[in-house]
Image (cartoon, rainbow, N blue to C red):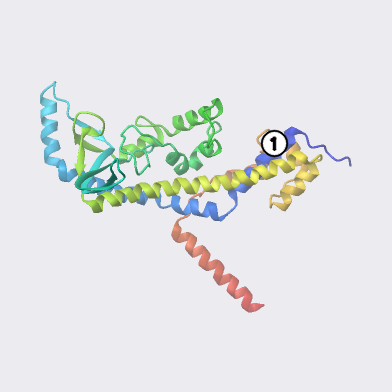
Amino acid sequence: MARIRLNQEYRNKCANRLRVHLEQEDTQEKQKYDDLKGDQIDLNDKAWEVAQKIVRRHYTLDDVAKARYLQDKFENVSTIAKDSCFHFHYLGTKESRDYNDNLVIEKDVPIERHFDFRLNGSIDTQSNYSGSHDYKYGYALFRDELKAQDNCNPDILVEQEGKDNNPHKTKYCDANNKYLGDDDRGYGKEWNDKYELDLIGREYCRDRSIKCTEQEFQFLIGWKQAKGQFVIAHEKWINSVLDQMKEIKIGLKGYKYLDEAIELSTELGLNITEAEIVRTNSTGLVIFNPKNLAERIKSMKNKHVSKEDKIKARLLYEAQQKEENSLN
């Protein structure tokens, strides 16, 4: 039987199938991402409890009720609004350098940061700007949901890191943001509605900085750092996949025949046949094979595994290995 020549269409199909395979492998990078992802809801809830405590010490529920009464009574009073971001500060010690590079120590100086609980809120621990946004966190947290959409790409910011803005990047970022939604719809609305309080003030973040303790402040800094670590875990995992894909594409480019690409796939743990590649669509999905389609659909279910279940599974595996070794 004549060997099938490897054209660009078949190269792309093989590469797409291998990309999916690499993303499904249980690597250290993926494990780190999955573990941190499982902690995110509890992490945000605990930080929100601290933020609520700080805010309600300053703006009590009784104060809010009185302000709302006045707002409802007078048309020219507009002082109550829901908010999810806050400026918090404590009085601490600040070090700086003067023009002669001498150390200057200031005491009882307001140390202030901006804390935004919205889905696209900034995770920069040094930021004190209420207009900052960061979409990386939402893309990483709702990666599975975005990945299931034909026109979305949750990894686009990782893939485009270091590159200038371009139509390809803009296309997928816009699609991602549209799907996730904001205050008006989608996951963004569901998320933002959960983390909001009635506050007294005039503008964004209700134009105030609220005093807190240093312990509370550092706890919230730790919360932002933990969110940042989750984003980094997503980036490291996807970058590890992208690095492998670079080598794979170089190899595929050098092959002349489809059976060489099939052999590479087999060596990498992906069992596919020439017939599958020939009969797939451009994404590499086998459209005429019901078994493969069923496996793809099944793989979309039960994505989340709790940390406790992972520990149980690991202990069970180690026990089975120990039993097998004792028999040998």
Q: Quadrant of residue 75?
A: top left
Q: Quadrant of residue 119?
A: top left
Type of the residue with mark 1: Asn
Residue at label 1? 12
In the displayed structure, would residue 294 be above or below residue 67?
Answer: below
Q: Looking at the picture, how far across and down is residue 203, in whole percent?
A: 23, 29
Identity of the residue drawn at 56% across and 67% down:
317
- In this view, which residue lies farthest toward the top? 75
Looking at this view, is 243 or 283 the one in front? Answer: 243
Residue 188 is situated, as x and y percent measured from the top left of the image, at: 38, 35
Residue 149: x and y in percent read 53, 34
Coordinates of residue 248 in the picture (x, y in percent): 69, 44
In the displayed orientation, state which residue is furthest to the front.
100
Foreground pick, 296 / 162: 162
Q: Residue at x 13, y 26 (%)?
A: 72
Quadrant where the image shows the N terminus: top right
Label 1 secondary element: helix
Instruction: Residue at 58%, 43% (x, y): give it.
Output: 297
Give the quadrant of the C terminus.
bottom right
Callout 1: few (<14), some (14-19), or many (20+) C-alpha neighbours within 10 Å? Answer: some
Can residue 92 be seen in this snapshot? yes
Of 126 and 325, the residue lying toward us:
126
Q: Residue at x 23, y 45 (%)?
A: 52
Task: Point out the residue furthest to the right here.
Answer: 1
Residue 148 visible from this viewpoint: no
